[in-house]
Amino acid sequence: MSQHSFIVANQAGASYRADVNSALQALASHSSGAAAPTTPYAYQMWADTNTGLLKIRNGANSAWITLGLLDVPLLGHIKPGMVVYHAKNAAPTGFLKANGGAVSRTTYADLFAEIGTTFGGGDGSTTFNVPELRAEFIRGWDDSRGVDSGRTFGSAQAQSIEAHTHLYGGSSSIMAPGSNAALTTGNSFGTSSYGGTETRPRNIALLACIKY
């Protein structure tokens, strides 16, 4: 850690050299320290070791602006394994498409260390699978709440419609439409069905990506 005012005074050789080296060290370490530099400059970087934040001085030289956490990539504090949705059909730098594909355990070692073989073991030795999120809705893991019990973390769930009964004319008994007779198995009263091939809410298609 080092800070410097970046003002080198006239002084003897050894002291001058030490002063310059101190200034260079402050530059190299982004003026790291638990307190703000005493003489700040516009757009100066400061590694605030007290709060663990990397900051930059604003253009007016009147305040510090937080850029991100120290020792954490600046890409929105997103760590390996985090999933984002991108408004483009190609994954941004630092991300993979969450398409269920098998990827290298060494090339993507940080991601493998985070999610392991939760979504598939690849070839069993050199690759592993990323989540398959194409055309899928995300449901929060139950995590012992009891609403969606019995689910394994990372597991997929098929579509379903909750069991229910349709009653005719508001009656408590099931009656044939336009008839006083009860609807029985095998009877046909000209009823029809409608709809598409799945049950879904309104939605928009974006690209699911995972940080590696």
Image: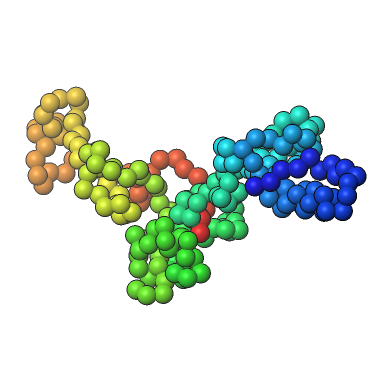
- Nearest the viewer among 13 and 37 is 13
Q: Position of residue 23 (x, y in %)?
A: 78, 48
User: Eyeballing the image, is 7 above or below 110?
Assistant: above
Q: Residue at x 74, y 34 (%)?
A: 38
Q: Residue at x 9, y 32 (%)?
A: 181
**Would residue 165 appear left or right of 24 to someone viewing this image?**
left
The colour scheme is rainbow
Q: Quadrant of residue 99?
A: bottom left
- Nearest the viewer among 116 and 88 is 116
**Would residue 43 appear left or right of 180 to someone viewing this image?**
right
Q: Position of residue 81 (x, y in %)?
A: 45, 54
User: Eyeballing the image, is 31 above or below 181?
Assistant: below
Q: Position of residue 179 (x, y in %)?
A: 14, 31
Is residue 182 something that shows in the picture? yes
**Would residue 2 appear left or right of 41 to someone viewing this image?**
left
Q: Quadrant of residue 164?
A: top left
